[in-house]
Amino acid sequence: MVKKNKRYFDKSEEKPSEDATDINSDKIITFDISDIKPKHFNKKKKQQNNPIVRKKTVNPKYRGKVPVSKELLNKYSQGKGANINGVRTIVHQKKLEKKEHDIKLATEIAARAEILLTEESGFLEADDGETTTQFTQKQIVDSVDITSAAKQFDLSLDFGPYKSRYTRNGRHLVLGGKKGHVAAFDWVTKKLHCEFNVMESVHDVCFLHVETMMAVAQKDWVYIYDNQGIELHCIKRLNKVTRMEFLPYHFLLSACSDEGYLSWLDVSIGKLVSQLNTRLGRLSMLAQNPWNAILCVGHAKGVVSMWSPNSREPLAKMLCHKAPITALHVDPSGMYMATSASNRELKIWDVRNLNGPLQDYKLVTAANHLNFSQKKMLGVGMGNVVEVYRDCCTNSAKKPYLRHRFVTSIESLNFCPYEDVLGVSTSRGFTSLLVPGSGEPNFDGLEANPFQTKSQRREAEVKSLLEKIQPELITLQPTAIGEVDVASLKDKVEARNKLLFIKPKKIDYQPRNKAKGKGGTVNMHKNKKILQGEAKKEFISNTKDLLPKFEQPRKVKPQEKPFNILERFVPKKPKV
Amino acid sequence: MKVKVISRNPDEYLRETKHDIHKVPRNYDPDLHPLQSAREYVRALNATKLERVFAKPFIGNLDGHRDGVSSLTKHPKRLSVLLSGAFDGEIRVWDLPSRDCIREFTAHNGIVRGISYTTQCDHFITVGDDKTIKTWKASKPQYGEEEEPVNTVLSKTVLTGISHHKDKGHFATSGEVCQIWDETRNEPIKTFSWGVDSLHDICFNPIEMNTLATCASDRSVILYDMRESEPLRKVVMKLRTNKMAWNPMEAYSFTCANEDYNLYTFDTRNLKQPVNVHMDHVSAVTYVDYSPTGKEFVSGSYDKSIRIFEVDKGHSREIYHTKRMQRLTCVQWTLDSKYILSGSDEMNIRIWKARASEKLGPLKPREKTALHYSEALKEKYASHPQIKRISRHRNVPKHIFNAQRELRTIKDKDKRREANRRAHTKPGEVPYVPERQKHVLKDQK
């Protein structure tokens, strides 16, 4: 009979475990002296003191932590690490080794923490003989739970064509109709924040860092409204804006204009950080690379140019197509860029390398709108059809994952962050489609939180303002700030060492052969001295400019004499 | 067809009641955290700036002496007790938490040269310019009782300093000679002398308890072993050493405060050259005391400033000064390693924080982790030019600023001259002499 309080993992009594006997018997294992290599003797003296080594008993059932898979470690890895062999002193070598070990450990812990994620990604699987493309929204809605079904909705609006944009946490939505209709609402609860007509044409809408503020590009200028529809600012420096992007970590509202201007406005201090003429004609496509906060602009020449506020020239220019570019978008990890052109081409590029397209597709009709989801699904809007492609970056996708047809043409396309939802705005309204598996299921509460309360939002706003990155740090390689600038450091040290106590070079003076009696050794010597003196003077004046500032003697201002009252009677200029 | 879409239950993400803290689910996927290094850099920069904003090291002062403070002694076992002696012979006992003087009496006729607690901490011994060694009870006399020494010894020679053995009932005094005394006897049990020069400071090693060291007026530091009959060794430096302190964690290392504006850390096993030269003061260094961790020490100087050095660094990490503080005579690092006490010429004893921007009092766990995090960030980005500049910058009084500039020009001039000499002589004629070898004249046995 089994005892009642016996646990399921208790071992049966008739078989005493071997491990237990191992421990109890206290077996001593002695090593033969010939086994131990003399090399070890020299290095580790401790072995001499206790030659009896007890064997570690390992329970075969519990062998420690499960090793983390290589892919997972790669995902969290922070690069290759430093080369320890190049370090001269042992102390610093050890220090670096410790640091590398810590970084490795942190990577492993982060990878291990993935097991704690609670939500799972969505999916849509077809049975045999079916394809996912054939499923309609109605079929999907019918087979999901009621809360998810409520995420599919359709708004028919009259002031179209509409532009739409989600907040960073995917909870709020703003719509802007060409005929002046602006509406912001919580699309999950369908609670309307505000709805008004600006009585001007609206070209683009965009949320700022929080859902309480949004920027609207109107006929002439960009306006900023709060979530009650009250006009907060009218920014006249941004005029004739066609597209806007908000860079959340830099607090920059970037906009491209009809007249070819690209501008960055710091919304935290209200300063225009940079405004430049691209000299590439009308700008109507704008995408940000979230990995490095660089703006990608598509042009009619088939070129994509990349801009940072720190340079008047583009950081990079890519000839992507041989026809005008119609749409472009960069995926949230900043790895891939999708571009489409009017010759029905769709290309996927690796933005980190800026070389050759990874994938090259030919579509049925030219794509007017592109959007990547967090899970790297690509939404393509072509006329009145929207198609979603899965795994289209690394493999070539043969068929769309989902397809949906509208009555009127598509005006903008946005995947909702942290949801399996694709928001499509058309000329007649807005439709929210379910795209299973498109969104990131697990959000980071400190980064973007869909369930944010008011107090949390306020706190997050203050925190993010404190961590505002200066626009000077926008570069193609965002990790550059964490690296040693070896080249310039070397130059600096070299220049310093060279300049400190150097003699001017003696010039080699070869006198011309002159006719007999004209020159003479004395004259020759004099000329040589003169030339050397000139060279020395030049050298000194050159080195003075090159020397670091602190080594130059300070210029002391001659102190002016305090003005005496009686001095007013002294004539200002001595009369001649 | 199989389908699933993300559908979150709000109950799992919202707090149950208003009294709970907000739930913060984390996901460490690097794609969700873009621009990580730039954000870390900004955090490090902010932390560095905040450290400077909160750097308010001065806590308070102990006011009461009627003449300059000549010596300070901390209680070996209690954190709240401090003894101070003044140039007019007065001794005061202070209660540090309340900043009150709990006892005062005139102990000597003339300057109080040194105070030292006995091993049991029930008495303390003072030496003064009147050539007497007086033993006093550590506890306050009863009501109506007079302040009287338990024991008075009249020394034959001048006394300039005292140091007590950590374990036994012995103490040592410096003066014309170095004398070892027993608490119970009125005659020295041992006398050491090396030459005719007088000694002005003495210090027992807290770990190797039988060894001690003195500073002599012939610019030397002399090491003794109490068990031997002769002094052990002697290092002669270019200028006089004012004060020395043993590292409480390493038996073999000590630091000297020198008249040539520098401090020198020596290893007793190799006295040919110091292990480290600590520069930054712009006038003679008068006092040095180690932190109980043995990793840092504090020095007071004639330039009216206190500096904190790390043992393995050549330059100070901190400078403390006030408008009213005059020449420093003595500095002590408290035994909880948190505070610094300084006595100066203008009769005040000042209390400082050892870490200028540290928050006093208990910390909440989240506060603590935040501080640890910013500490790690500061270290990681320490060599970035902007962060380096902010963390290193100190506003110093004008006289120090000017003196620093003057010293720098002098040093640059010497360097330039040497380089010129080297450039115009045969190679090898003007050798490169490391800074550490410039200051020791000889090491005698």
Image: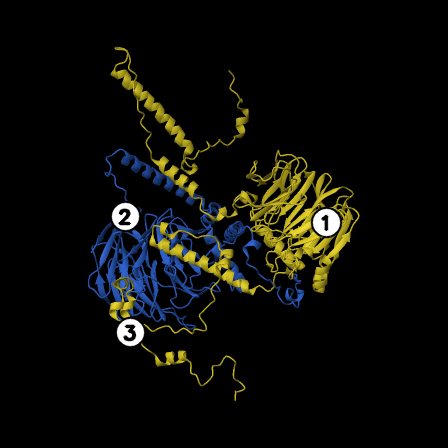
Chain colours: A yellow, B blue
Front residue of A524 and B350: A524
Q: Is residue A145 left or right of residue B108?
A: right
What residue is rendered at 50% in x and 32% in y? A562
Kindly identify which chain the residue marked by label 3 belongs to.
Answer: A
Q: Quadrant of residue A171?
A: bottom right
**Residue bearing the label numbered 3:** A30
In front: label 2 or label 1: 1
Q: Residues within 10 Å of mark 2 (few under 14, many from 20)?
A: few
What residue is rendered at 24% in x and 39% in y? B428
Front residue of A16 and A84: A16
Residue lying farthest right? Answer: A158
Q: Would residue B69 be visible to someone looking at this image?
A: no
Q: Is the residue A321 above or below the residue B113 in the image?
A: above
Amino acid under label 2? Gln
Q: Residues within 10 Å of mark 3 (few under 14, many from 20)?
A: few
* Location of residue B284 in the rendering, given as x and y in whole percent from the top left corner: 35, 49
Q: Are marks 3 and 1 on the same chain?
A: yes
Q: Would residue A223 be visible to someone looking at this image?
A: yes
Q: CA distance from mark 3 to mark 2?
A: 53 Å
Label 2 element class: helix
* Location of residue B403 in the rendering, given as x and y in whole percent from the top left corner: 39, 43
Query: Which comes before the other along the chain, label 3 or label 1?
Result: 3
Q: Quadrant of the C terminus of chain B?
A: bottom left
Kindly identify which chain the residue marked by label 2 belongs to.
Answer: B
Q: Is residue B284 left or right of residue B101?
A: left
Q: CA distance from mark 2 to mark 1?
A: 79 Å
In front: label 3 or label 2: 3
Amino acid under label 3? Thr
- As drawn, the label of residue A425 is 1
How many numbered discs, if any?
3
**Residue bearing the label numbered 2:** B437
Q: Is residue A235 left or right of residue B281?
A: right
